[in-house]
Image: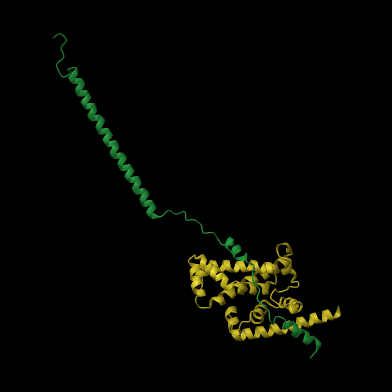
Chain colours: A green, B yellow
């Protein structure tokens, strides 16, 4: 065997007994930092939309009901007031300034 | 838990499974990258790329191959991509964007090589760098990772005969390269 062949064999066999390399402990954190961050969903669930819509409808109905109530009450009161005034000043009676 | 279970967990966003999977394969991935790239910094960067790719594509893993085969394949592809990128940068003259070692293929001292073999190991890695991509991968998987020809065939997606042929050509080419080194050293 030539001297060069012996040297080449030694080079080729230099990995004998080789241990495996271990990566740095910080590598996992580096990977985590590079993972795409899960975006918080900006979509609102149907349940939330339904709840909000129901709430708004209820609020609207309550408002309409109160407005209707409000409108009816002053009219009744006004009617009462007018009647009182008519009665007080006896406006229903025929008006004749020459009659005592 | 099996690697398949862990991959399924990763696909469902379970980070505990991802951590377990990392612990299971980190040494395998890192060593394949290190043997190809011959630079710890680049090997760590590509190892990160490999696990990010695993996290991204866990759901698309087909049960046709073993998980370790799939992981090896990703690691080799990413390493070769990095080497090709470095070669392109070298050709275009933009050496600022790549690390010095990957560009010059300088003396690489693999941290796992026994201290008495350090010098010879560095010569071997320098010679490995001169092999064609496929010969390089086949040689690393066989003689550094210690895999069988059957496993190498599955990883490289070629037949066992093709692996045998690649290994034969790699060894022949390495002997030629080393013979040149021997004469160069003798001439000095």
| B52 versus A85 height, above or below | below
Which residue occupies the foreground of this view, A90 or B157? A90
Query: Is B115 displayed left or right of B28 in the figure?
Result: right
Residue ranking furthest to the bottom: A1
Count of marks placed on residues: 0
Residue at left offset 83%, top offset 79%:
B185
| B63 versus A86 height, above or below | below
Quadrant of image for the C terminus of chain A: top left
Quadrant of image for the N terminus of chain A: bottom right
Picture quadrant of residue B136:
bottom right
Which residue occupies the foreground of this view, A26 or B147? A26
Q: Position of residue B181 (x, y in %)?
A: 79, 80
Residue at left offset 72%, top offset 83%:
A12
Which residue occupies the foreground of this view, B70 or B117? B117
| B134 versus B89 height, above or below | below
Picture quadrant of residue B73:
bottom right
Q: Position of residue B78 (x, y in %)?
A: 62, 70
Query: Is B143 displayed left or right of B52 in the figure?
Result: right
Residue at left offset 33%, top offset 45%:
A57
Q: Position of residue A91 (x, y in %)?
A: 18, 18
Query: Is A22 displayed left or right of B20 in the figure?
Result: right
Q: Position of residue B47 (x, y in %)?
A: 62, 69
Query: Is A40 displayed left or right of A10 in the figure?
Result: left
């Amino acid at each position: 065997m030539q001297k060069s062949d012996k040297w080449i064999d030694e080079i080729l066999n230099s990995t004998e007994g080789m241990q495996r390399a271990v990566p740095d402990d910080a590598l996992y954190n580096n990977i985590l930092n590079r993972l795409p961050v899960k975006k918080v969903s900006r979509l609102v669930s149907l349940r939330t939309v339904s709840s909000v819509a129901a709430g708004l409808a209820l609020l609207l109905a309550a408002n309409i009901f109160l407005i209707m109530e409000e409108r009816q009450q002053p009219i009744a009161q006004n009617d009462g007031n007018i009647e009182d005034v008519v009665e007080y000043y006896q406006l229903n009676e025929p008006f004749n300034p020459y009659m005592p | 838990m099996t690697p398949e279970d862990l991959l399924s967990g990763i696909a469902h966003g379970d980070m505990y499974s991802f951590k377990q999977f990392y612990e299971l394969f980190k040494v395998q991935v890192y060593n394949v990258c290190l043997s190809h790239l011959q630079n710890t910094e680049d090997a760590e960067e590509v190892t990160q790329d490999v696990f990010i790719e695993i996290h991204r594509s866990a759901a698309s893993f087909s049960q046709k191959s073993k998980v370790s085969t799939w992981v090896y394949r990703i690691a080799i592809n990413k390493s070769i991509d990095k080497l090709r990128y470095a070669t392109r940068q070298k050709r275009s003259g933009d050496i600022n964007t790549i690390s010095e070692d990957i560009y010059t293929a300088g003396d690489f001292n693999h941290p796992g090589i026994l201290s008495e073999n350090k010098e010879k190991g560095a010569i071997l890695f320098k010679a490995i760098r001169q092999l064609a991509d496929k010969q390089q991968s086949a040689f690393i998987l066989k003689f550094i990772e210690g895999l069988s020809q059957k496993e190498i065939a599955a990883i490289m997606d070629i037949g066992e005969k093709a692996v045998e042929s690649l290994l034969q050509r790699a060894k022949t080419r390495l002997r030629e390269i080393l013979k040149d080194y021997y004469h160069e050293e003798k001439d000095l």
